[in-house]
Image (cartoon, grey):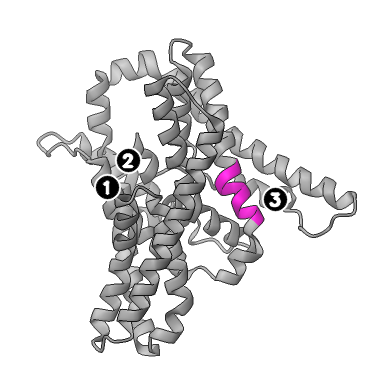
Amino acid sequence: YLAHRLNLPPAVALIVGGAGMAFIPGLPRVSLDPELVLVIFLPPLLMDGAWFIPLRRLRRHLVGTLALAIGAVVFTTLVVAVATHLLLPSLPWAACAALGAIVSPPDAVSARAVLQRVSLPTRLSALLEGESLLNDATGLVLFRFAIAAAVTGTFSTVDAVGSFALLTVGGAAVGAACAGAWMFVVKRLEDEYLIIASSVLMGWAAYILSEQVHVSGVIGTVVCGLICGWHQHTVFSATVRLRGTSFWGVLVFLLEASVFMLIGSSLREVVTRVGGFEVVFDQMAAPILWIVLAMVLARFVWIFLFDGVLVLSRRLGYRRFETLGWRASSVLSWAGMRGVVTLAVA
């Protein structure tokens, strides 16, 4: 209510409110199980984004989407790793890379929560929606590689690329299989409430099954959502689509609100674990601020550099891709908020 009255994004109020509640005497301490947080919140939110994104628009802006979802995440990981190693030389490179992978993927929930009240150009919306569907997979895979390098002391680029391809293709195959099974079953369901419930459960089914066979649960959920959303007009009646859309809207609102409250509420446990606010301010404040600055600037550099390449290519006669311009690039650069995935992986 206060956020609406003060014209602030509700997500900000929920995070601040959760952080404030975390330090109220007498309230129980909130302790997050990261695996549980990812399983509960990530699949339905990814499913919602994939279900309602226009597939033709995603395909039209696929190059730009991949440049953000893969290129920007890898570039940010490298920049943060270098900045961290310069600030804390005692940290091994693998640990710095792990930190970079943790903070590199922008959060779909955060960006949508802040931008939902703003009317954006179609291309910007498509890039942000497409990026938010795929960048978590890139960050999680990079994190796995960094941890493996920290444990074994070795890193192979060839093995990393091969593993990334296997995780991506495997996740897509599992997601497509889940979507095919869902369409086969849902055509035979007569109860519209069962039909709507099945569409929600498919996000968790695709994610958990993908993780069980050791491929990307994020890619599995996204592919499942894209296929199911594309075919919803052939398997759903108009009444079911209307009711399903309303149900999805309420469910996503509750999940997003819970996520931001949990992010704020986890602050007390973090501060307690590191030794209190004195340790945070004396030893961690400066490195944290520099790392956050490096993280933010890395996205600006990548997006403006990529747009510069498009400008140069058009001047050389290759006019297939439109440039963004400095206004759109600035908005896209600022839309890099971090959220539930970064918190859970950390």
- Residue at the spot x=52%, y=29% of the render? 156
Q: Which residue is mark 1?
A: 37
Residue kind at label 3, given as amino acid type: Arg
Q: Nearer the viewer, residue 77 or 304?
A: 77
Q: Nearer the viewer, residue 317 or 23?
A: 317
Which tag, 2 or 3, sits closer to the chain's start? Answer: 3
Q: Measured from the top left, where is residue 307 in percent x and y?
A: 73, 46
Q: Is residue 240 toward the left or the right of residue 314 in the image?
A: left
Q: Measured from the top left, where is residue 266 in percent x and y?
A: 26, 37
Which tag, 2 or 1, sits closer to the chain's start? Answer: 1
Q: Is residue 295 visible?
A: no
The 10 Å Cα crowd at callout 1, few under 14, some 14 to 19, many 20 or more, is: some
Q: Which residue is mark 3?
A: 327
Query: Foreground mark, 2 or 3?
Result: 2
Determine the secondary structure under disc 3.
helix
Determine the secondary structure under disc 2.
helix
The C terminus appears in which quarter of the rendering?
top left
Q: Measured from the top left, where is residue 175 in percent x and y?
A: 40, 63
Q: Which residue is mark 2?
A: 344
